[in-house]
Amino acid sequence: MKIIHTSDWHLGARLHEEDRTDEHRAFLDWLAQLMKSEKPDALIVSGDVFDVKAPSPQAQTLYYGFLARVVKERLCRRTIVAAGNHDSARMLAAPSRLLEELGVSVVSSTSLDGGPAGRVVTVEGDGGAPALSVAVIPFLFDAELANIGLETAGDQAPRDEKTHAGWKKACEDAIAAARAAAPDAPVAAVAHCTLANAKKSDGESERCRRIGGIDAYDPAPLSGADYAALGHLHIPQSVKGFEKKMFYSGSPLKMSFDEAGREKSVNIVIFDGPGNAPSVRLAEIPQTVPILTVEGTPGEAEEKLAELVAADRNAKRFVRVRLKDFDGPAKEHWQTCRKIAEGSMTLILEENDMRPAVRETAGLKAFSGREIKQLDPRDVAKQKLKTCGRNFSDSQVEEFMDMYDEVAGGIT
Protein backbone atom coordinates (compact mmCIF):
# COMPACT_ATOMS: atom_id res chain seq x y z
CA MET A 1 0.00 0.00 0.00
CA LYS A 2 1.47 3.33 -1.09
CA ILE A 3 0.28 6.83 -0.24
CA ILE A 4 1.43 10.34 -1.03
CA HIS A 5 1.16 12.72 1.92
CA THR A 6 0.97 16.47 1.30
CA SER A 7 -0.38 19.41 3.27
CA ASP A 8 -0.77 23.17 3.69
CA TRP A 9 -1.40 24.09 0.07
CA HIS A 10 -2.79 27.49 1.12
CA LEU A 11 -4.39 28.02 -2.27
CA GLY A 12 -5.07 31.72 -2.76
CA ALA A 13 -2.19 32.79 -0.52
CA ARG A 14 -0.19 35.87 -1.38
CA LEU A 15 3.29 36.93 -0.38
CA HIS A 16 3.09 40.61 0.56
CA GLU A 17 0.06 40.94 -1.73
CA GLU A 18 1.89 39.30 -4.67
CA ASP A 19 -0.33 36.75 -6.38
CA ARG A 20 0.94 33.15 -6.33
CA THR A 21 -1.69 31.41 -8.45
CA ASP A 22 0.83 30.40 -11.11
CA GLU A 23 3.07 28.83 -8.45
CA HIS A 24 0.18 26.84 -7.02
CA ARG A 25 -0.90 25.73 -10.49
CA ALA A 26 2.65 24.56 -11.22
CA PHE A 27 2.73 22.61 -7.95
CA LEU A 28 -0.56 20.85 -8.66
CA ASP A 29 0.62 19.96 -12.18
CA TRP A 30 3.82 18.58 -10.69
CA LEU A 31 1.86 16.60 -8.08
CA ALA A 32 -0.35 15.07 -10.77
CA GLN A 33 2.74 14.01 -12.72
CA LEU A 34 4.27 12.54 -9.56
CA MET A 35 1.10 10.53 -8.97
CA LYS A 36 1.22 9.25 -12.54
CA SER A 37 4.75 7.95 -12.06
CA GLU A 38 4.40 6.70 -8.46
CA LYS A 39 0.90 5.19 -8.86
CA PRO A 40 -0.14 5.66 -5.22
CA ASP A 41 -3.19 3.95 -3.77
CA ALA A 42 -4.18 7.11 -1.93
CA LEU A 43 -3.44 10.81 -1.67
CA ILE A 44 -3.68 12.44 1.77
CA VAL A 45 -3.98 16.21 2.18
CA SER A 46 -3.52 17.08 5.86
CA GLY A 47 -5.34 20.38 6.05
CA ASP A 48 -5.11 24.05 5.01
CA VAL A 49 -6.20 23.44 1.45
CA PHE A 50 -7.05 27.15 1.24
CA ASP A 51 -5.40 30.18 2.79
CA VAL A 52 -8.63 31.81 3.96
CA LYS A 53 -12.04 30.58 5.02
CA ALA A 54 -13.74 32.32 2.08
CA PRO A 55 -11.39 31.41 -0.79
CA SER A 56 -11.59 33.19 -4.12
CA PRO A 57 -13.25 31.51 -7.12
CA GLN A 58 -9.76 31.24 -8.63
CA ALA A 59 -8.46 29.28 -5.62
CA GLN A 60 -11.51 27.00 -5.65
CA THR A 61 -11.07 26.38 -9.37
CA LEU A 62 -7.51 25.18 -8.73
CA TYR A 63 -8.70 22.81 -5.99
CA TYR A 64 -11.69 21.29 -7.74
CA GLY A 65 -9.85 21.21 -11.05
CA PHE A 66 -7.10 19.15 -9.46
CA LEU A 67 -9.58 16.75 -7.86
CA ALA A 68 -11.33 16.35 -11.20
CA ARG A 69 -7.99 15.50 -12.80
CA VAL A 70 -7.24 12.90 -10.13
CA VAL A 71 -10.62 11.25 -10.75
CA LYS A 72 -10.57 11.49 -14.54
CA GLU A 73 -7.01 10.18 -14.90
CA ARG A 74 -7.45 7.63 -12.09
CA LEU A 75 -4.32 8.82 -10.35
CA CYS A 76 -5.23 6.97 -7.12
CA ARG A 77 -8.04 4.94 -5.59
CA ARG A 78 -8.87 7.38 -2.81
CA THR A 79 -8.14 11.02 -2.00
CA ILE A 80 -8.50 12.02 1.65
CA VAL A 81 -8.74 15.72 2.57
CA ALA A 82 -8.73 16.96 6.17
CA ALA A 83 -9.79 20.48 7.13
CA GLY A 84 -7.15 22.78 8.63
CA ASN A 85 -7.40 25.94 10.71
CA HIS A 86 -7.32 28.14 7.59
CA ASP A 87 -10.18 26.21 6.00
CA SER A 88 -13.88 26.70 6.53
CA ALA A 89 -15.01 23.30 7.79
CA ARG A 90 -18.52 23.78 6.42
CA MET A 91 -17.42 25.11 3.04
CA LEU A 92 -14.89 22.32 2.55
CA ALA A 93 -17.43 19.68 3.58
CA ALA A 94 -20.37 21.09 1.59
CA PRO A 95 -19.83 18.91 -1.54
CA SER A 96 -18.59 15.90 0.46
CA ARG A 97 -21.49 13.58 -0.49
CA LEU A 98 -20.85 14.19 -4.18
CA LEU A 99 -17.06 13.94 -3.80
CA GLU A 100 -17.40 10.69 -1.85
CA GLU A 101 -19.03 9.09 -4.89
CA LEU A 102 -15.96 10.12 -6.88
CA GLY A 103 -13.49 8.62 -4.42
CA VAL A 104 -12.70 11.83 -2.52
CA SER A 105 -13.29 11.79 1.25
CA VAL A 106 -13.45 15.16 3.02
CA VAL A 107 -13.29 15.18 6.82
CA SER A 108 -13.80 18.34 8.89
CA SER A 109 -15.13 19.22 12.32
CA THR A 110 -18.63 18.75 10.86
CA SER A 111 -17.80 15.02 10.87
CA LEU A 112 -17.85 14.96 14.69
CA ASP A 113 -21.56 14.20 14.62
CA GLY A 114 -20.83 10.76 13.19
CA GLY A 115 -18.61 9.81 16.14
CA PRO A 116 -15.10 8.30 15.69
CA ALA A 117 -16.34 5.95 12.97
CA GLY A 118 -17.40 8.97 10.93
CA ARG A 119 -13.78 10.06 10.75
CA VAL A 120 -12.44 6.78 9.38
CA VAL A 121 -11.72 6.19 5.69
CA THR A 122 -10.65 2.81 4.32
CA VAL A 123 -8.61 2.37 1.16
CA GLU A 124 -9.09 -0.81 -0.83
CA GLY A 125 -6.21 -2.92 -2.07
CA ASP A 126 -5.93 -4.79 -5.35
CA GLY A 127 -8.26 -7.56 -4.13
CA GLY A 128 -11.00 -5.14 -3.02
CA ALA A 129 -10.49 -5.69 0.72
CA PRO A 130 -9.43 -2.77 2.96
CA ALA A 131 -5.64 -2.46 2.75
CA LEU A 132 -5.29 0.80 4.72
CA SER A 133 -7.48 2.35 7.39
CA VAL A 134 -7.19 6.10 7.88
CA ALA A 135 -8.20 7.89 11.09
CA VAL A 136 -8.73 11.61 10.42
CA ILE A 137 -8.48 14.20 13.20
CA PRO A 138 -9.25 17.52 11.47
CA PHE A 139 -8.39 20.84 13.03
CA LEU A 140 -10.52 21.32 16.14
CA PHE A 141 -10.85 24.56 18.07
CA ASP A 142 -10.19 24.55 21.79
CA ALA A 143 -13.91 24.67 22.64
CA GLU A 144 -14.53 21.57 20.53
CA LEU A 145 -11.63 19.73 22.17
CA ALA A 146 -12.71 20.84 25.64
CA ASN A 147 -16.20 19.45 25.03
CA ILE A 148 -14.70 16.14 23.92
CA GLY A 149 -12.52 16.11 27.04
CA LEU A 150 -15.36 16.71 29.49
CA GLU A 151 -16.01 13.00 29.88
CA THR A 152 -12.50 12.15 31.09
CA ALA A 153 -11.36 15.43 32.69
CA GLY A 154 -14.62 16.34 34.38
CA ASP A 155 -16.64 19.53 34.26
CA GLN A 156 -14.66 21.20 37.07
CA ALA A 157 -11.25 20.69 35.45
CA PRO A 158 -9.33 23.74 34.14
CA ARG A 159 -9.97 24.52 30.48
CA ASP A 160 -6.43 23.55 29.39
CA GLU A 161 -6.80 20.17 31.10
CA LYS A 162 -10.10 19.54 29.34
CA THR A 163 -8.56 20.59 26.01
CA HIS A 164 -5.62 18.21 26.40
CA ALA A 165 -7.97 15.44 27.46
CA GLY A 166 -10.10 16.14 24.39
CA TRP A 167 -7.07 15.95 22.13
CA LYS A 168 -6.08 12.60 23.64
CA LYS A 169 -9.59 11.18 23.35
CA ALA A 170 -10.15 12.45 19.79
CA CYS A 171 -6.93 10.82 18.59
CA GLU A 172 -7.25 7.54 20.46
CA ASP A 173 -10.93 7.05 19.62
CA ALA A 174 -10.37 7.73 15.91
CA ILE A 175 -7.38 5.36 15.76
CA ALA A 176 -9.31 2.66 17.63
CA ALA A 177 -12.21 3.04 15.19
CA ALA A 178 -9.78 2.74 12.29
CA ARG A 179 -8.34 -0.48 13.74
CA ALA A 180 -11.82 -1.88 14.20
CA ALA A 181 -12.83 -0.98 10.65
CA ALA A 182 -9.95 -2.99 9.14
CA PRO A 183 -8.22 -5.19 11.76
CA ASP A 184 -5.74 -6.66 9.28
CA ALA A 185 -4.70 -3.36 7.68
CA PRO A 186 -2.15 -0.76 8.76
CA VAL A 187 -3.53 2.48 10.18
CA ALA A 188 -2.61 6.01 9.17
CA ALA A 189 -3.67 8.95 11.33
CA VAL A 190 -4.21 12.37 9.76
CA ALA A 191 -4.03 15.40 12.04
CA HIS A 192 -3.74 19.16 11.63
CA CYS A 193 -2.00 20.45 14.74
CA THR A 194 1.25 21.55 16.40
CA LEU A 195 2.98 18.72 18.23
CA ALA A 196 5.55 19.15 20.97
CA ASN A 197 9.18 19.11 19.77
CA ALA A 198 8.22 20.06 16.21
CA LYS A 199 9.99 22.94 14.47
CA LYS A 200 8.09 26.05 13.42
CA SER A 201 9.11 28.01 10.33
CA ASP A 202 8.44 31.57 11.50
CA GLY A 203 6.17 33.73 13.59
CA GLU A 204 3.79 34.91 10.89
CA SER A 205 2.90 32.37 8.19
CA GLU A 206 1.74 29.61 10.57
CA ARG A 207 -1.28 31.41 11.93
CA CYS A 208 -3.26 30.16 14.90
CA ARG A 209 -0.47 28.01 16.30
CA ARG A 210 -1.85 28.55 19.78
CA ILE A 211 -5.04 26.61 20.37
CA GLY A 212 -6.89 27.73 23.49
CA GLY A 213 -3.65 29.12 24.92
CA ILE A 214 -1.87 25.82 24.28
CA ASP A 215 1.27 25.97 22.15
CA ALA A 216 1.60 22.29 21.30
CA TYR A 217 0.06 18.89 21.91
CA ASP A 218 1.46 15.62 23.13
CA PRO A 219 2.28 13.36 20.16
CA ALA A 220 1.75 10.18 22.21
CA PRO A 221 -2.01 9.86 21.48
CA LEU A 222 -1.12 9.46 17.78
CA SER A 223 1.41 6.70 18.44
CA GLY A 224 -1.22 3.97 18.05
CA ALA A 225 -1.16 4.57 14.30
CA ASP A 226 1.48 3.11 12.01
CA TYR A 227 1.98 6.50 10.35
CA ALA A 228 0.83 10.01 11.29
CA ALA A 229 0.31 12.33 8.32
CA LEU A 230 0.56 15.75 9.92
CA GLY A 231 -0.31 19.23 8.73
CA HIS A 232 -0.09 22.82 9.99
CA LEU A 233 3.67 23.36 10.29
CA HIS A 234 5.40 24.34 7.06
CA ILE A 235 8.79 22.67 7.54
CA PRO A 236 9.02 19.08 6.25
CA GLN A 237 10.11 17.09 9.30
CA SER A 238 9.64 14.08 11.51
CA VAL A 239 8.56 14.51 15.12
CA LYS A 240 11.27 14.03 17.75
CA GLY A 241 10.80 10.75 19.59
CA PHE A 242 8.60 9.36 16.82
CA GLU A 243 10.93 9.77 13.86
CA LYS A 244 9.82 6.59 12.10
CA LYS A 245 6.09 7.21 12.14
CA MET A 246 5.13 10.89 12.56
CA PHE A 247 5.79 13.35 9.74
CA TYR A 248 4.88 16.86 8.66
CA SER A 249 5.01 17.05 4.88
CA GLY A 250 5.20 20.85 5.08
CA SER A 251 3.82 23.43 2.66
CA PRO A 252 4.57 23.05 -1.06
CA LEU A 253 5.45 26.75 -1.42
CA LYS A 254 7.75 28.83 0.72
CA MET A 255 5.26 30.87 2.70
CA SER A 256 7.65 33.53 4.03
CA PHE A 257 11.16 34.82 3.54
CA ASP A 258 12.24 32.92 6.65
CA GLU A 259 11.74 29.73 4.61
CA ALA A 260 13.99 30.92 1.77
CA GLY A 261 16.74 28.36 2.32
CA ARG A 262 14.51 25.34 2.90
CA GLU A 263 13.59 22.60 0.45
CA LYS A 264 9.94 21.68 0.01
CA SER A 265 8.66 18.14 -0.47
CA VAL A 266 5.85 15.61 -0.26
CA ASN A 267 6.11 12.25 1.49
CA ILE A 268 5.85 8.97 -0.37
CA VAL A 269 4.91 6.30 2.19
CA ILE A 270 4.86 2.54 1.66
CA PHE A 271 3.17 0.31 4.25
CA ASP A 272 4.20 -3.29 4.87
CA GLY A 273 1.43 -4.62 7.07
CA PRO A 274 0.03 -3.45 10.43
CA GLY A 275 2.53 -2.88 13.24
CA ASN A 276 5.48 -2.39 10.89
CA ALA A 277 7.19 0.94 10.43
CA PRO A 278 6.45 2.22 6.91
CA SER A 279 9.20 3.32 4.56
CA VAL A 280 9.14 7.06 3.90
CA ARG A 281 10.97 8.99 1.22
CA LEU A 282 10.69 12.60 0.16
CA ALA A 283 10.02 13.95 -3.32
CA GLU A 284 11.40 17.48 -3.62
CA ILE A 285 8.98 20.06 -5.04
CA PRO A 286 10.48 22.39 -7.65
CA GLN A 287 9.99 26.08 -6.83
CA THR A 288 8.99 28.13 -9.86
CA VAL A 289 9.60 31.55 -8.25
CA PRO A 290 12.77 31.84 -6.13
CA ILE A 291 12.49 33.58 -2.76
CA LEU A 292 15.75 35.34 -1.96
CA THR A 293 17.30 37.62 0.66
CA VAL A 294 19.85 40.29 -0.26
CA GLU A 295 21.68 41.47 2.85
CA GLY A 296 24.60 43.73 3.75
CA THR A 297 25.59 47.35 3.95
CA PRO A 298 23.73 49.57 1.49
CA GLY A 299 26.62 49.36 -0.96
CA GLU A 300 26.89 45.58 -0.65
CA ALA A 301 23.14 45.05 -0.97
CA GLU A 302 22.89 47.34 -3.99
CA GLU A 303 25.76 45.51 -5.70
CA LYS A 304 24.24 42.07 -5.03
CA LEU A 305 20.84 43.24 -6.22
CA ALA A 306 22.32 44.70 -9.41
CA GLU A 307 24.08 41.39 -10.15
CA LEU A 308 20.85 39.51 -9.57
CA VAL A 309 18.87 41.73 -11.93
CA ALA A 310 21.60 41.71 -14.60
CA ALA A 311 21.68 37.90 -14.61
CA ASP A 312 18.13 37.79 -16.03
CA ARG A 313 15.79 40.76 -16.04
CA ASN A 314 12.83 38.59 -17.08
CA ALA A 315 13.19 35.94 -14.38
CA LYS A 316 10.56 36.40 -11.67
CA ARG A 317 11.95 36.51 -8.13
CA PHE A 318 10.64 37.62 -4.75
CA VAL A 319 13.34 39.50 -2.85
CA ARG A 320 13.81 40.72 0.70
CA VAL A 321 16.42 43.46 1.16
CA ARG A 322 18.04 43.74 4.59
CA LEU A 323 20.40 46.65 5.29
CA LYS A 324 22.86 46.91 8.18
CA ASP A 325 25.92 48.85 9.36
CA PHE A 326 25.12 52.32 8.04
CA ASP A 327 24.28 55.77 9.37
CA GLY A 328 21.41 58.07 8.60
CA PRO A 329 17.93 57.34 7.24
CA ALA A 330 17.31 54.26 5.12
CA LYS A 331 14.89 55.96 2.73
CA GLU A 332 17.42 56.90 0.08
CA HIS A 333 18.87 53.38 0.07
CA TRP A 334 15.43 51.85 -0.43
CA GLN A 335 14.89 54.21 -3.34
CA THR A 336 18.21 53.15 -4.90
CA CYS A 337 17.33 49.46 -4.55
CA ARG A 338 13.93 49.98 -6.13
CA LYS A 339 15.51 51.87 -9.00
CA ILE A 340 17.94 48.99 -9.61
CA ALA A 341 15.05 46.51 -9.83
CA GLU A 342 12.78 48.83 -11.83
CA GLY A 343 11.62 47.35 -15.11
CA SER A 344 12.69 43.81 -14.18
CA MET A 345 10.84 40.82 -12.75
CA THR A 346 12.92 41.02 -9.58
CA LEU A 347 10.25 42.13 -7.11
CA ILE A 348 11.34 43.66 -3.82
CA LEU A 349 8.57 42.65 -1.43
CA GLU A 350 10.18 43.34 1.93
CA GLU A 351 12.65 45.93 3.22
CA ASN A 352 14.30 45.50 6.63
CA ASP A 353 16.48 47.96 8.50
CA MET A 354 18.61 45.59 10.57
CA ARG A 355 20.26 48.21 12.76
CA PRO A 356 19.42 48.17 16.47
CA ALA A 357 16.13 49.98 16.92
CA VAL A 358 16.28 53.59 18.05
CA ARG A 359 13.15 54.67 19.83
CA GLU A 360 12.11 58.16 18.79
CA THR A 361 10.12 58.82 21.96
CA ALA A 362 9.05 57.04 25.08
CA GLY A 363 6.54 55.02 23.10
CA LEU A 364 2.92 55.34 24.13
CA LYS A 365 4.04 57.21 27.23
CA ALA A 366 4.03 60.23 24.91
CA PHE A 367 0.26 60.25 25.45
CA SER A 368 0.43 60.10 29.24
CA GLY A 369 -1.55 62.77 31.03
CA ARG A 370 -4.30 62.84 28.41
CA GLU A 371 -7.78 61.56 28.96
CA ILE A 372 -9.00 58.70 26.81
CA LYS A 373 -11.57 60.89 25.05
CA GLN A 374 -8.77 63.27 24.01
CA LEU A 375 -6.82 60.57 22.16
CA ASP A 376 -7.07 60.03 18.44
CA PRO A 377 -6.87 56.25 17.78
CA ARG A 378 -5.03 56.89 14.51
CA ASP A 379 -2.33 58.91 16.28
CA VAL A 380 -1.91 56.16 18.87
CA ALA A 381 -1.58 53.47 16.18
CA LYS A 382 0.99 55.51 14.26
CA GLN A 383 3.02 56.22 17.39
CA LYS A 384 3.02 52.50 18.22
CA LEU A 385 4.40 51.66 14.77
CA LYS A 386 7.18 54.21 15.12
CA THR A 387 8.27 52.97 18.54
CA CYS A 388 7.73 49.20 18.34
CA GLY A 389 11.40 48.41 17.81
CA ARG A 390 11.14 47.28 14.17
CA ASN A 391 12.73 50.33 12.45
CA PHE A 392 9.88 50.71 10.00
CA SER A 393 10.60 53.24 7.27
CA ASP A 394 8.29 56.22 6.79
CA SER A 395 6.82 54.56 3.69
CA GLN A 396 6.18 51.32 5.61
CA VAL A 397 4.48 53.23 8.41
CA GLU A 398 2.24 54.93 5.86
CA GLU A 399 1.39 51.58 4.24
CA PHE A 400 0.34 50.22 7.63
CA MET A 401 -1.69 53.35 8.29
CA ASP A 402 -3.46 52.95 4.94
CA MET A 403 -4.46 49.45 6.06
CA TYR A 404 -5.54 50.86 9.43
CA ASP A 405 -7.73 53.44 7.67
CA GLU A 406 -9.27 50.73 5.48
CA VAL A 407 -10.13 48.56 8.48
CA ALA A 408 -11.25 51.43 10.71
CA GLY A 409 -13.37 52.82 7.90
CA GLY A 410 -15.33 49.57 7.77
CA ILE A 411 -16.20 49.67 11.47
CA THR A 412 -19.52 51.31 12.20
Image: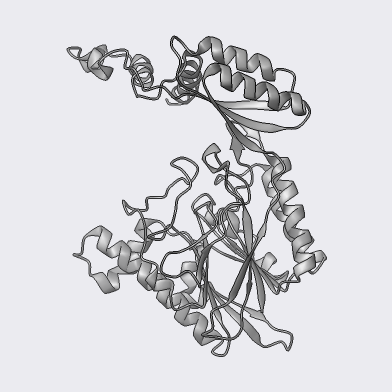
Asked if residue 366 is positioned above or below residue 5 in the image, the reply reads above
View extreme (right): residue: 73
Query: Could you tell me if residue 75 is visible in this image?
Result: no
Residue that appears at 65% across and 71% down: 3
Foreground residue among 183 and 120? 183
Image x and y of residue 100, in percent: 67, 69
* Count of numbered badges drawn on the protein: 0
Instruction: Using the image as rendered, state which of residue 184 and residue 104 is in the foreground.
Output: 184
- In the rendered view of the protein, which quadrant contains the C terminus? top left
**Relative to 177, is 168 above or below?**
above
Q: Position of residue 153 (x, y in %)?
A: 25, 70
Image location (x, y in percent) of residue 268 = 65, 68
Q: Which residue is drawn at 61% across and 17% down?
A: 337
Q: Is residue 247 visible to us here?
A: yes
Is 235 above or below relative to 318?
A: below
Residue 292 figure quarter = top right
Q: Answer with left or right where residue 81 lies relative to residue 23.
A: left
**On the picture, is 33 further left or further right than 409?**
right
Residue at 55%, 43% (x, y): give it.
259
Residue 113, how many percent across, how many down?
47, 69
Q: Which quadrant is home to the N terminus?
A: bottom right
Viewed as shown, does residue 212 lie left or right of 269?
A: left
Question: Residue 300 occupies which quadrant of the picture?
Answer: top right
The color scheme shown is one colour
Residue 176 left/right relative to 288: left
